[in-house]
Image (spheres, grey):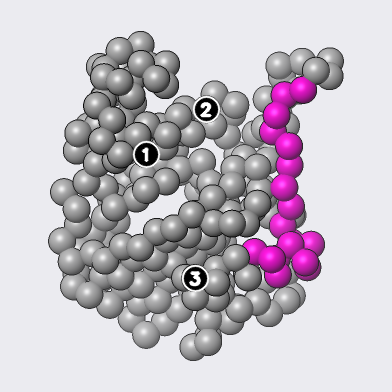
Amino acid sequence: MYPLGLMWRERLSYSPFVESVWKCNAPVTTSRTVIADPSISISLVESGGKAQVIISGPVTKPYRVPLPAGYVRTTIRLKPAVFLKGFSTYELRGNPLIFPADSQARFWFKGICFQFPGFNQAELLINDLFKWDCLSRADLRRDGRASSDRTYSRHVQSITGLSPYQLYQLQRMHTALRLLRQGVPPADVAIELGFADQSHLTRASKQFLGYTPNQSTDLPQDP
């Protein structure tokens, strides 16, 4: 199941704004499955001698994308509570922002020239976005203040582009994928994460990852 010819690197981040950073290279024509993901992603895509920076919102269902030979993508996944100022995260779900980049991976955003750094220095871009007041972080915890379910739901959706239940579903499925990749049996994952049974986990895995729990361990992502 691991895409033929796809080279994948992924790491966690020290930044309070970043969930993870990954990079994929496709030396030959291939394809990969994009799994459901609650994060906003900022990517540098290099293909066909051109470079673009793409900012996209959460993904609620998996889909397959073709990758031409020579395709390279470096992606910074923001934490779900982190958002871009002046842009609706919900609208980013289906309408990614695309910016041309030059040969040095520089691009213009909100009238400012930013540099998309390499894989190991990806946090530098996030620091610059924060410094120029383009990015912020919200508190999604529900505290003891008197607020209605509807008010809390609107707050979560305005930040993440997802309802509280959608956010919970996606985060739980990413936790399940991590445990499955660590070798935890699907039945134990189902119990630990509160699925009704292993069949419930299997249905959720197909819905959000595109594969069964056993198949999903071959996915390159390690969210």
Q: Quadrant of residue 179?
A: top left
Q: Is residue 193 visible?
A: yes
Q: Quadrant of residue 37?
A: top left
Q: Secondary structure at mark 1?
A: helix
- Mark nearer the N terminus (2 vs 3): 3
Estimate how packed mark 1 is, as few (under 14), some (14 to 19) or many (20 or more) residues with alpha carbons within 10 Å: some
Q: Secondary structure at mark 2?
A: helix
Q: Nearer the viewer, residue 98 or 163?
A: 163
Q: What is the three-letter code of the residue carrying label 1?
A: Arg
- Mark nearer the N terminus (1 vs 2): 2
> Residue 196: x and y, percent?
35, 11
In the rendered structure, the answer to whether residue 198 lies left or right of residue 153 reads: left
Q: What is the three-letter code of the residue carrying label 3?
A: Asn
**Residue 120 tag number:** 3
Answer whether residue 122 is magenta in the image.
Answer: no
> Residue 89: x and y, percent?
62, 46
Q: What is the three-letter code of the residue carrying label 2?
A: Tyr
Q: In the current view of this chain or complex, which residue is farthest to the right?
A: 146
Residue receiving disc 2: 168
Task: Please tell me whether mark 1 or mark 2 is closer to you in this view.
Answer: 1
The residue segment tinted magenta is 126-143
- Mark nearer the N terminus (1 vs 3): 3
Going 26% across and 66% down the picture, which residue do you hit?
Answer: 7
Estimate how packed mark 3 is, as few (under 14), some (14 to 19) or many (20 or more) residues with alpha carbons within 10 Å: few
Going 69% across and 38% down the picture, which residue do you hit?
Answer: 158
Spatial CA distance of label 2 from label 3 is 29 Å
Estimate how packed mark 2 is, as few (under 14), some (14 to 19) or many (20 or more) residues with alpha carbons within 10 Å: few
Residue receiving disc 1: 178
Q: Secondary structure at mark 3?
A: helix
Spatial CA distance of label 1 from label 2 is 15 Å
